[in-house]
Image (cartoon, rainbow, N blue to C red):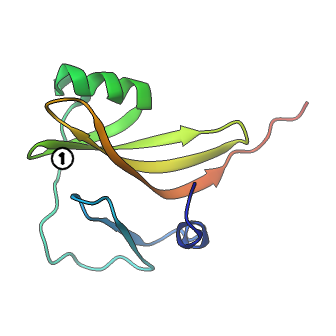
Amino acid sequence: MLGPEVLARSSSSAGLAKVDLRSGRVALQAEAVEEETPSVKGGTPLDQLPPLVKELVAREKWQSAYVVGPRVYGQADVGDPRHRVEHRIQAVDVATGKLLWQRAFGEWSLPIPPP
């Protein structure tokens, strides 16, 4: 489930979500600010990830992946039966393919098709 802070801010179209890569803690800001620390650019092609990680990537339907040290970070959009889609960041151990943590950073509702 999404926390009330994420839900309250998820309706805005601009902002910044900072994720502490060790803990998975998410800090939200209303407007993007210039970064003081470097960020990972470009990503890692999904087909170049280790086999154990590829299994989780396929199951969770990641759109992108970034290998940083002993972890792989990726974004997944997860749907539910109530026609909601939740954006998640997930951290996976490179050696074992184990999901270490995941955090939601936004959600939206899909239109319900007519009967």
Type of amino acid under label 1: Gly
Extreme-right residue of the structure: 115
> Where does label 1 land, which residue?
42
Image quadrant where residue 35 sits: bottom left
Instruction: Look at 34% across and 28% down and name the residue there.
Output: 56
* Quadrant of the frame with the N terminus: bottom right
Label 1 packing within 10 angstroms: few (<14), some (14-19), many (20+): few
Residue at image location 42% in from the left, 41% down from the top: 76
**57 is higher (above) or lower (below) than 27:** above
Q: Is residue 55 above or below residue 106?
A: above
Tell me how many marks there are.
Answer: 1
Quarter residue 73 falls in = top left
Q: Position of residue 101 (x, y in %)?
A: 34, 48
Q: Reply above or below: 73 against 20.
A: above
**Image coords of residue 103 (percent x, y):** 41, 54
Answer above or below: position of 70 versus 32.
Answer: above
As drawn, is 48 to the left or to the right of 17?
left
Q: Position of residue 75 (x, y in %)?
A: 37, 45
Give left or right: position of 15 versus 37: right
Q: How far across and down, in percent of the image, does residue 52 sit?
A: 23, 22
Residue at 13% from the left image edge and 31% from the top image edge: 95
Secondary structure of residue under mark 1? loop
The quadrant of the picture occupied by the C terminus is top right
Of residues 49 and 53, which is closer to you in this image? 53
